[in-house]
Amino acid sequence: MANRTVKDAKSVHGTNPQYLVEKIIRSRVYDSKYWKEECFALTAELLVDKAMEIRYLGGVFGGNIKPTPFLCLTLKMLQIQPEKDIVVEFIKNEEFKYVRALGAFYMRLTGSSLDCYKYLEPLYNDNRKLRRQNRQSQFEIVHMDEFIDELLRDERVCDVILPRVQKRYVLEENNELEAKVSALEDDLDEDIELDEEKKCRTTAET
């Protein structure tokens, strides 16, 4: 199969899935040692094992634009186009945080606007630390919820231009998505309920 997309792959956002990554970056990935040695003949079934070995996020780095394993595996997923339920299992994986991050990134690249909100927003409750390699080859800390926020708000993440997603309020107005309730609002609602219960008890006792 070399670097070609699988024959039965579906068009994503009107294009070959691999074309979601810019040509110059794709070329760097194809030429990289990691791609040739670790991604060759990788199937959807074997992909999760390779994803479990990831230790940091990132796009490309260094003056000669080297791709990170995270970006290489992203392109591999675009090439072999795993079933949606496999991607969802990546996102739901609580044990391996980089598997979750990889699944979220792939979903953001290939999923519908509705799926992006549906599967990514719950990860706002995950505040685990992630290591990310920047363009200068330095490592920085980013939390999972920050990474998810970047995926839903920024135009480019890990050196890949993200497809446009519909504004959340549009999906809400079309009754495709329920209004967002933050964890903070949930906590406030619980506090209000507790206060009301205390008042009722105090009134009953007096």
Image (spheres, rainbow, N blue to C red):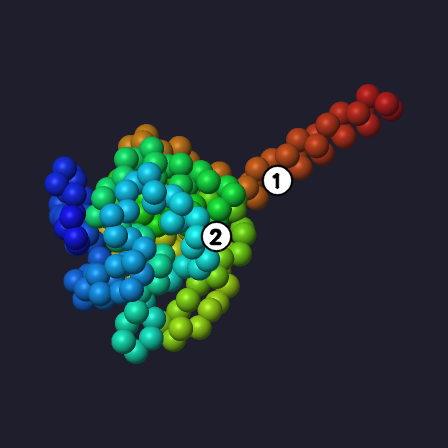
Task: Say which residue label 2 marks.
Answer: 144
Residue 179 percent location from the top left of the image? 42, 36
- Neighbour class for label 2 at 10 Å: few (<14), some, many (≥20)? many
Which image quadrant is residue 155 in? bottom left
Does residue 30 appear in the picture of this structure?
yes
- Neighbour class for label 1 at 10 Å: few (<14), some, many (≥20)? few
Callout 2 secondary element = helix
In this rendering, the answer to whether 31 lies above or below 175 is: below
Question: On the picture, is 8 further left or further right than 115?
Answer: left
Which image quadrant is residue 44 in? top left
Residue 192 percent location from the top left of the image? 65, 35
Separation (CA) of disc 1 from disc 2:
23 Å
- Residue 188 — which label? 1
Residue 33 vs residue 8, the one in the foreground: 33
The residue drawn where x is 34% and y is 45% is 47
Q: Amino acid at mark 1?
A: Leu
Residue 95 vs residue 19, the one in the foreground: 95
In this rendering, the answer to whether 176 lies above or below 154 is: above
**Image quadrant containing the C terminus:** top right
- Marks 1 and 2: CB-CB under 8 Å? no
In this rendering, the answer to whether 134 lies above or below 105 is: below
